[in-house]
Image (cartoon, grey):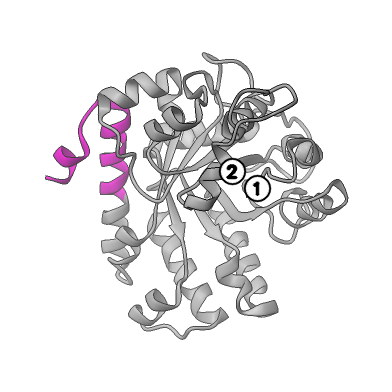
């Protein structure tokens, strides 16, 4: 998998994360495995519901998916629930992932004022960050201007950012589809503005994949239709959270355009349910990565892959 930028900070470009992720997606397929140590899965695997159990689960998932998927995503809240021991476990998991060369995305979904986001940089993005990852997720509803410094810091350190643009929560969708009353996106939806602002950090379509992406929970076609977001001209990675895209292949082609190869689909339960046997986990990850590649890039319907 792609090597993370070294601690010297030399030779880092703003497209570093996007290039490494694109290389991994081409090699292993557009799958990001979510390493989510939920309490029920810990019990199913025979682990205790504590920080040690979360760490053992995560290490086993890393071992099973290493060299088989493009990236892994870890949800900080599932470690945070165990306090300082949980954070220590997360630090060790991320350290091992870096040694393996696994691309890691920390799903922290944070945001804040300019004075707050510097702490996120220190925690996740700097070369000496205790929980250094390749990318993090953030929420934009404090305003994109408040996040400019954090996004700039990520790019300067060869890291990536995924901005939450469209979620499955009905209450949030009311806000995401609301029409901007003032500003440069007046008359457009909030989600359209988020997409446009994220794209401003990337090079134009037809270039290499950028390092500032979007996180979307739901059908990509629905996202485009409901929000008017210009997905086809978005050149950053698109983290499709929760399941395979449920649009038909023809719809995906029309909606995504040149961005079709930038979609990274997340999956958790279908793979973790095969554990704790490492061979079964690995086989499940490889099979799902191949199926998603066929759906996104080769126009195969999801029903055909499952059959």
For residue 203: magenta? no
Dot 1 or dot 2: first in sequence order is: 1
**Going by the image, does 119 lie left or right of 163?**
right
Q: In the figure, 192 relative to 206: above or below? A: below
**Going by the image, does 39 lie left or right of 137?**
left
- Residue 259 x %, y %: 45, 23
Q: Secondary structure at mark 1?
A: strand
Q: Nearer the viewer, residue 142 or 149?
A: 142
- Residue at the spot of label 2: 175
- Residue 69 x %, y %: 40, 46
Provide the major secondary structure of the magenta segment.
helix
Q: Quadrant of residue 163?
A: top right
**Can residue 1 be seen at all in this image of the molecule?**
no
Q: Nearer the viewer, residue 67 or 295?
A: 295
Which residue occupies 63% across, 18% down? 203
- Residue at the spot of label 1: 138
Q: In the figure, 216 relative to 284: above or below? A: above
**Can residue 302 be seen at all in this image of the molecule?**
yes
Which residue occupies 41% across, 48% down? 67
* Segment colored magenta: 286-307
Q: Nearer the viewer, mark 1 or mark 2?
A: 2
Q: Residue furthest bottom?
A: 48
Q: Please tell me how crowded label 2 is: few (under 14), some (14-19), or many (20+) other residues with Cα within 10 Å.
A: some
Which residue occupies 61% across, 79% down? 82
Quadrant location of the C terminus in the rendered image: top left
**Going by the image, does 19 lie left or right of 39?**
right
Q: Secondary structure at mark 2?
A: helix
């Amino acid at each position: 998998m792609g090597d993370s930028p070294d601690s010297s900070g030399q030779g880092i470009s703003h497209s570093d994360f996007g290039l490494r992720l694109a290389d991994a997606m081409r090699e292993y397929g557009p799958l990001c495995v979510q390493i989510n140590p939920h309490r029920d899965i810990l019990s199913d695997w025979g682990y205790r519901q504590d920080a040690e159990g979360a760490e053992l689960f995560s290490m086993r998932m890393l071992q099973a998916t290493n060299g088989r998927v493009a990236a892994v995503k870890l949800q900080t809240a599932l470690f945070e629930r165990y306090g300082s021991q949980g954070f220590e476990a997360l630090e060790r998991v991320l350290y091992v992932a870096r040694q393996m060369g696994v691309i890691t995305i920390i799903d922290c979904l944070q945001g804040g004022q300019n004075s707050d986001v510097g702490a996120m940089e220190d925690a996740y993005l700097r070369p000496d960050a205790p929980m250094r990852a390749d990318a993090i997720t953030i929420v934009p509803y404090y305003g994109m201007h408040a996040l400019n410094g954090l996004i700039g810091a990520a790019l300067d350190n060869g890291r990536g950012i995924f901005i939450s643009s469209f979620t499955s929560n009905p209450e949030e969708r009311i806000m995401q589809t609301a029409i901007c009353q003032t500003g440069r996106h007046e008359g457009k939806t909030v989600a359209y503005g988020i997409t446009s602002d994220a794209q401003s950090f990337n090079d134009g379509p037809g270039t290499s994949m950028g390092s500032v992406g979007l996180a979307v929970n739901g059908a990509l076609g629905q996202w485009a239709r409901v929000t008017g977001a210009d997905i086809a001209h978005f050149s950053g990675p698109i983290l499709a959270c929760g399941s395979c895209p449920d649009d038909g292949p023809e719809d995906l082609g029309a909606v995504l355009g040149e961005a079709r190869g930038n979609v990274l689909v997340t999956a958790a339960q279908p793979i973790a349910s095969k554990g704790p046997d490492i061979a079964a986990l690995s086989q499940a990850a490889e099979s799902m990565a191949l199926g998603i590649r066929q759906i996104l890039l080769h126009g195969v319907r999801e029903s055909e892959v499952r059959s």
